[in-house]
């Protein structure tokens, strides 16, 4: 048994499989991959004087018959719930730094100019380049779907605090090879509205995913409920038909059939109760809670530029624009429109002679709401 990562067989690991491996290593335990999706885990004892516990887990239900002593590892199982709760208790918030990035890219000015679309005659001059820490907040939420069964999903989203935009390359941002607990450079922090501003943005992004997941489960639930109600209806219909047949036979023999009427009424009541219980259990409720938060301070380059049209003369003025060079993905991030503050790479001439995004430039009164 080893605490090393070992080889990954069959492609990328599932988030839950990666979590269990990470948890065991971080808590001082060890894991051994018996076969793909089957592990022996040596978990640290809860009490300091107790012995470590070794358990076998399987992420694939089809592997259980071959490993009957294994526990199925899935969201909602006691083992996984306990490990998730322990991880939340000990690591609700972590601060990490991205290291090893190239902060002196060649041809930066040309790259910025190529990324920008300006009106004819306008030029863009780079006036300053400053390396800064750009905080990015990565959130992990646990979504629990409760109906006639319980399911859980882990949803992750990262927000760049500088502009309040969603980070689209979360996997690369969380690359272990580039993360450290201490910074490699003593950089200042870029201006931003604070960590609290990122949480509602993250929840909004997660709610969109959550709504899609809930709608899918709701459709499945409605279909499953319809099938179950149909089976219950057939079952009680057959029972009533049998009682009615017994009633007819009793009447043909001149016997008292009152008891059969009582049975029929009891069957109707029982069907109504079971149907109501089934409908109640089939109502979907969704619960969302924050599991973990990681603040990642990534060095980026804040590029200050000036856009102007030399043919219009110095009196026309210049528009100051800030761009961000992300060395992790080697891309220029969009600036903000001076009027609506939405991200844009394209700038057009406004009626007042300034620069703005095409939507604001086409508006008669871009700074007022109509």
Image (spheres, rainbow, N blue to C red):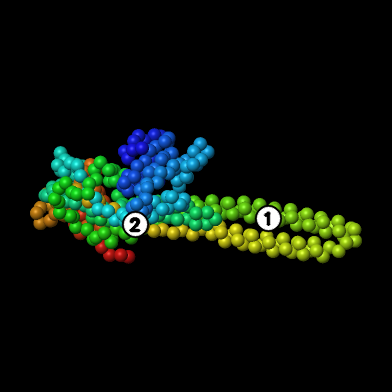
Rendered residue at 13%/50% (across/down): 186
- Outermost residue on the front side: it is 49
Percent across and percent down for residue 150 are 50, 54
Which secondary structure lies at badge 2?
Answer: helix
Rendered residue at 90%/58% (across/down): 253
Depth check: give the residue in front, 367 or 23: 23
Rendered residue at 29%/56% (across/down): 93
Q: What's the mark number on residue 78?
A: none
**Is residue 312 something that shows in the picture?**
yes
Depth check: give the residue in front, 51 or 284: 51
Percent across and percent down for residue 297 are 22, 51
Which quadrant of the rendered structure holds the C terminus? Answer: bottom left
Which secondary structure lies at badge 1?
Answer: helix
Which quadrant of the rendered structure holds the N terminus? Answer: top left
Percent across and percent down for residue 141 are 37, 55
Q: Which of marks 1 and 2 is nearer the N terminus?
A: 2
Query: Where is 67 relative to 367, above or below?
Result: above
Depth check: give the residue in front, 288 or 26: 26
Q: Is residue 290 left or right of residue 263?
A: left
Query: Where is 220 relative to 268, above or below?
Result: above
| Alpha carbon separation for disc pair 1 and 2 | 48 Å
Neighbour class for label 1 at 10 Å: few (<14), some, many (≥20)? some
Q: What's the mark number on residue 89?
A: 2
Where is mark 1, residue-wise? 233
Q: Is residue 173 left or right of residue 216?
A: left
Query: Where is 263 relative to 223, above or below?
Result: below
Nearer the observer: mark 1 or 2; the answer is: 2
- Outermost residue on the left side: it is 314
């Amino acid at each position: 048994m080893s605490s090393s990562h070992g080889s990954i067989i069959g492609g990328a690991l599932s988030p839950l499989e990666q979590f269990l491996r990470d948890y065991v290593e971080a808590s001082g335990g060890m894991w051994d991959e018996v076969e793909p999706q089957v592990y022996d885990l040596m978990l640290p004892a809860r009490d300091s004087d107790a012995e470590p516990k070794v358990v076998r887990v399987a992420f694939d239900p089809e592997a259980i018959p071959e490993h009957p002593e294994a526990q199925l590892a899935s969201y909602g199982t006691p083992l996984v719930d306990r490990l998730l709760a322990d991880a939340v208790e000990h690591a609700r918030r972590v601060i990490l730094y991205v290291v090893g990035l190239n902060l002196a890219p060649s041809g930066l000015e040309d790259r910025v100019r190529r990324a920008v679309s300006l009106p004819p005659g306008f030029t863009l001059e780079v006036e300053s380049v400053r390396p800064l820490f750009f905080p990015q907040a990565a959130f992990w939420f646990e979504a629990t779907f409760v109906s006639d069964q319980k399911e859980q999903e882990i949803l992750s989203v990262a927000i760049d605090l500088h502009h309040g935009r969603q980070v689209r390359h979360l996997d690369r941002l969380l690359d272990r090879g580039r993360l450290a607990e201490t910074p490699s450079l003593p950089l200042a922090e870029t201006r931003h509205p604070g960590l609290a501003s990122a949480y509602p943005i993250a929840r909004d992004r997660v709610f969109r995913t959550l709504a899609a997941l809930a709608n899918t489960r709701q459709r499945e639930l409605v279909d499953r409920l319809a099938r179950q109600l149909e089976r219950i209806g057939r079952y009680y219909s057959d029972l009533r038909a049998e009682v009615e047949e017994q009633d007819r036979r009793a009447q043909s023999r001149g016997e008292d059939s009152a008891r059969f009427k009582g049975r029929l009424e009891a069957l109707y009541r029982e069907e109504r109760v079971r149907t109501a219980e089934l409908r109640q259990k089939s109502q979907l409720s969704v619960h969302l809670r924050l599991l973990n938060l990681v603040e990642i301070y990534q060095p980026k380059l804040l590029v200050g530029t000036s856009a102007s049209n030399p043919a219009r003369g110095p009196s026309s003025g210049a528009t100051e624009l800030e761009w961000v060079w992300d060395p992790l993905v080697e891309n220029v991030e969009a600036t903000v429109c001076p009027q609506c503050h939405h991200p844009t790479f394209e700038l057009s001439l406004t009626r007042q002679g300034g620069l703005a995004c095409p939507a604001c430039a086409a508006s008669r009164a871009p700074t007022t709401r109509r």
